[in-house]
Amino acid sequence: MGTEPSMYLKELGLSKYEACAYTCLLQRGISTAQEVSDGGDVPQPRVYDALDSLSEKGFVEIQPGRPKKFGPVDPDLAIERFREYKQRQYDEELSEMQRLGDQFANAVENTTGATEGSEICWTYSDRHHILEKLSELTTTATSEIRMITTPISFEHILNHHVEELTRKAETGTTIRAVVSEDGVVPAAIYERAEKIMDIRRVENIEGRIYLYDNAHVLVAFAADNDDGYVGISTTSDTLYRTQSQLFDLLWANGHEMNRASTHANTSVRTGDESV
């Protein structure tokens, strides 16, 4: 028997000495460890380890006695047993990964449970990415969306996200918007908005703040860059609580939106003057 079978055995995952020992047994039949060592060119100190490992993997049967003898399992049956061995090994590794993963999750929870939740913060330096992030946050919101914004930004949000906002309102998500009085809201925009959210007006607002599900804050404001705006998105518990209190204060002191604060222009602005 040539070296080719040994090569395939090593590709299956057997060690060099395991492959040599099994090939030798297929040639010689039932043999002692010494005979396998001599016939398979397996060093004497390694032969018992190789044969025991082959037995565990399904390639070898052991006959007790003095000396012990080792017989080859039929190759088809050996491969089937080896597959079962690898499956058990894989299942055990997955179980161990699950156990360690659970322990890790518990350790993280115990470490951070008494402190503020982890803060994830991203910065967006152009209006396109800010609007994309607003769309993502709107899509994933499940309980509440709150906005502190300007008329122009409010118009852009309705133009970009009205369908998703409508879906959220229909599934029970509460949507409220505080809009500054430093501009008018087109009547068409107001009519679309009042169907899906509550709106109040307040005096001028610097910056724009968007709050989602008691967890996420996005702040957008004018900046001295090429685009003119910067957005910051974060999961900071402290910032969320602070901005939430600001929203509640503005909401309590705001007044309901009325027709006097809208104009009848039904055209839709497509330029991104703001976010």
Image (cartoon, helix red, strand yellow):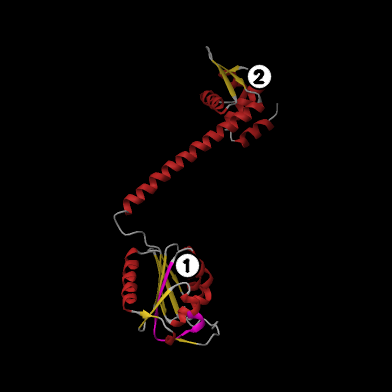
From the image, state whether disc 2 or disc 1 is nearer to you: 1
Q: Residues within 10 Å of mark 1 (few under 14, many from 20)?
A: some
SS of the residue under disc 1: helix
Please state, as top left, top right, bottom left or bottom right, where the N terminus lies in the image: top right
Residue 230 at x, y = what percent? 43, 76
Image location (x, y in percent) of residue 245: 31, 70
Q: In this rendered view, identify the residue nearer to me: 195 or 108.
A: 195
Picture residue at 31% right of the left edge, 74% below the top: 249
Q: Looking at the image, which residue is at 32% across and 72% down?
A: 248
- Whether the magenta-drawn stretch holds residue 26 is answered as no
The residues tagged by marks 2 and 1 sit, at their Cα atoms, a distance apart of 78 Å
Q: Which residue is mark 2?
A: 28
Instruction: Find disc 1 in the rendering and name its residue.
Output: 169
Q: Quadrant of residue 256?
A: bottom left
Amino acid on which the number 2 mark rests in the picture: Arg
Q: On residue 94, which mark appears?
A: none
The three-letter code of the residue at mark 1 reads: Ala
State left or right for residue 235 relative to residue 42: left
Name the residue nearer the viewer: 28 or 185: 185
171 shown above or below 222: above
- The residue drawn where x is 39% and y is 85% is 181
* Horizontal arrangement in the rendering, residue 131 relative to residue 211 (left or right): right
Q: Is residue 126 visible?
A: no
Magenta range is 174-190
Q: Position of residue 183 (x, y in %)?
A: 43, 86
Helix, strand or loop at label 2? It is: helix
Q: Outermost residue, left direction?
A: 114
Q: Position of residue 141 (x, y in %)?
A: 45, 64
First along the sequence among labels 2 and 1 = 2
